[in-house]
Image (cartoon, rainbow, N blue to C red):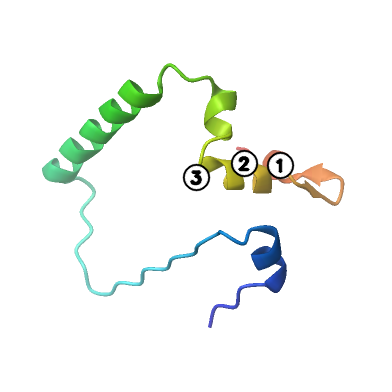
Amino acid sequence: MLIISEKIKKVYPESLLGILAIRKVCNPNQHEGLNQCKLELENNLRKNFAQLERSDLKNMEPLKPYNDYSQRDIGGSRASQVHKM
Protein backbone atom coordinates (compact mmCIF):
# COMPACT_ATOMS: atom_id res chain seq x y z
CA MET A 1 0.00 0.00 0.00
CA LEU A 2 1.17 3.51 -0.81
CA ILE A 3 0.29 6.30 1.63
CA ILE A 4 0.76 9.94 0.64
CA SER A 5 1.55 12.22 3.56
CA GLU A 6 -0.87 15.06 4.27
CA LYS A 7 2.19 17.31 4.65
CA ILE A 8 3.18 16.71 1.03
CA LYS A 9 -0.37 17.49 -0.08
CA LYS A 10 -0.25 20.80 1.82
CA VAL A 11 3.19 21.83 0.56
CA TYR A 12 2.60 20.67 -3.05
CA PRO A 13 -1.20 20.67 -3.55
CA GLU A 14 -0.87 20.41 -7.35
CA SER A 15 1.55 17.46 -7.27
CA LEU A 16 0.68 14.20 -8.97
CA LEU A 17 2.04 10.70 -8.45
CA GLY A 18 1.91 7.82 -10.85
CA ILE A 19 2.91 4.19 -10.51
CA LEU A 20 3.14 1.60 -13.24
CA ALA A 21 3.65 -2.05 -12.37
CA ILE A 22 4.18 -4.54 -15.20
CA ARG A 23 4.91 -8.25 -15.17
CA LYS A 24 6.21 -10.65 -17.79
CA VAL A 25 7.29 -8.12 -20.39
CA CYS A 26 10.32 -8.12 -22.65
CA ASN A 27 12.77 -5.33 -21.85
CA PRO A 28 15.64 -5.47 -24.36
CA ASN A 29 18.80 -3.41 -23.83
CA GLN A 30 18.39 -1.79 -27.26
CA HIS A 31 15.44 -1.21 -29.59
CA GLU A 32 15.85 0.61 -32.90
CA GLY A 33 12.39 2.24 -32.77
CA LEU A 34 12.93 3.47 -29.22
CA ASN A 35 16.40 4.74 -30.09
CA GLN A 36 14.92 6.76 -32.96
CA CYS A 37 12.21 8.21 -30.68
CA LYS A 38 14.84 9.17 -28.08
CA LEU A 39 16.96 10.88 -30.74
CA GLU A 40 13.97 12.86 -32.01
CA LEU A 41 13.03 13.85 -28.45
CA GLU A 42 16.59 14.99 -27.67
CA ASN A 43 16.72 17.05 -30.86
CA ASN A 44 13.33 18.61 -30.11
CA LEU A 45 14.35 19.49 -26.55
CA ARG A 46 17.60 21.05 -27.78
CA LYS A 47 15.72 23.06 -30.41
CA ASN A 48 13.17 24.36 -27.90
CA PHE A 49 15.30 24.88 -24.79
CA ALA A 50 18.97 25.29 -25.78
CA GLN A 51 18.71 29.08 -25.68
CA LEU A 52 17.59 29.07 -22.04
CA GLU A 53 19.88 29.37 -19.06
CA ARG A 54 19.87 26.66 -16.37
CA SER A 55 18.19 29.11 -13.96
CA ASP A 56 15.36 29.63 -16.48
CA LEU A 57 14.84 25.88 -16.78
CA LYS A 58 14.77 25.42 -13.00
CA ASN A 59 11.85 27.85 -12.74
CA MET A 60 9.73 26.19 -15.43
CA GLU A 61 7.03 23.61 -14.87
CA PRO A 62 7.35 20.72 -14.23
CA LEU A 63 10.93 21.23 -13.00
CA LYS A 64 10.23 23.99 -10.46
CA PRO A 65 8.49 21.78 -7.84
CA TYR A 66 11.27 19.19 -8.11
CA ASN A 67 13.94 21.87 -7.83
CA ASP A 68 12.21 23.46 -4.83
CA TYR A 69 11.93 20.06 -3.16
CA SER A 70 15.57 19.16 -3.81
CA GLN A 71 16.78 22.50 -2.44
CA ARG A 72 15.05 22.16 0.94
CA ASP A 73 17.11 21.93 4.09
CA ILE A 74 17.27 18.49 5.76
CA GLY A 75 18.95 18.54 9.14
CA GLY A 76 21.38 21.26 8.13
CA SER A 77 22.28 19.61 4.83
CA ARG A 78 20.57 20.54 1.60
CA ALA A 79 18.82 17.62 -0.09
CA SER A 80 20.44 18.44 -3.44
CA GLN A 81 23.89 18.04 -1.88
CA VAL A 82 22.98 14.75 -0.23
CA HIS A 83 21.78 13.15 -3.47
CA LYS A 84 24.39 14.47 -5.91
CA MET A 85 26.72 11.88 -7.42
Q: Is residue 49 toward the left or the right of residue 71 in the image?
A: left
Nearer to us in this view, 68 or 27: 68
Asked where in the image residue 55 lies, by quadrant, the reply is top right
What residue appears at the point 27 percent right and 26 percent down from the top-left corner?
43
Mark 3 residue type: Pro
Residue 57's mark?
none
Q: Is residue 71 above or below residue 16?
A: above
Q: Is residue 49 toward the left or the right of residue 16 in the image?
A: left
Q: Which element is circle 2 on? A: helix
Q: Are there few (<14), some (14-19), or many (20+) residues within 10 Å of tag 2?
A: some
Which residue is the extreme one toward the front? 14
- Find disc 3 in the rendering and name its residue: 62
How far separated are the C-alphas under marks 1 and 3? 15 Å
Mark 1 residue type: Gln
Which residue is the extreme one toward the top? 51
What x and y, as percent, mark residue 10?
Answer: 70, 65
Q: Nearer the viewer, mark 1 or mark 3?
A: 3
**First in sequence: mark 3 vs mark 2:** 3
Quadrant placement of the C terminus: top right
Which residue is the extreme one toward the right? 76
What x and y, as percent, mark residue 40?
Answer: 21, 32
- Find disc 2 in the rendering and name its residue: 67
Q: Nearer the viewer, mark 3 or mark 2?
A: 3
How far separated are the C-alphas under marks 3 and 2? 9 Å
Residue 71's mark?
1
What residue appears at the point 19 percent right and 63 percent down from the top-left corner?
26
**First in sequence: mark 1 vs mark 3:** 3
Q: Which element is circle 3 on? A: loop
Q: Are there few (<14), some (14-19), or many (20+) residues within 10 Å of tag 1?
A: some
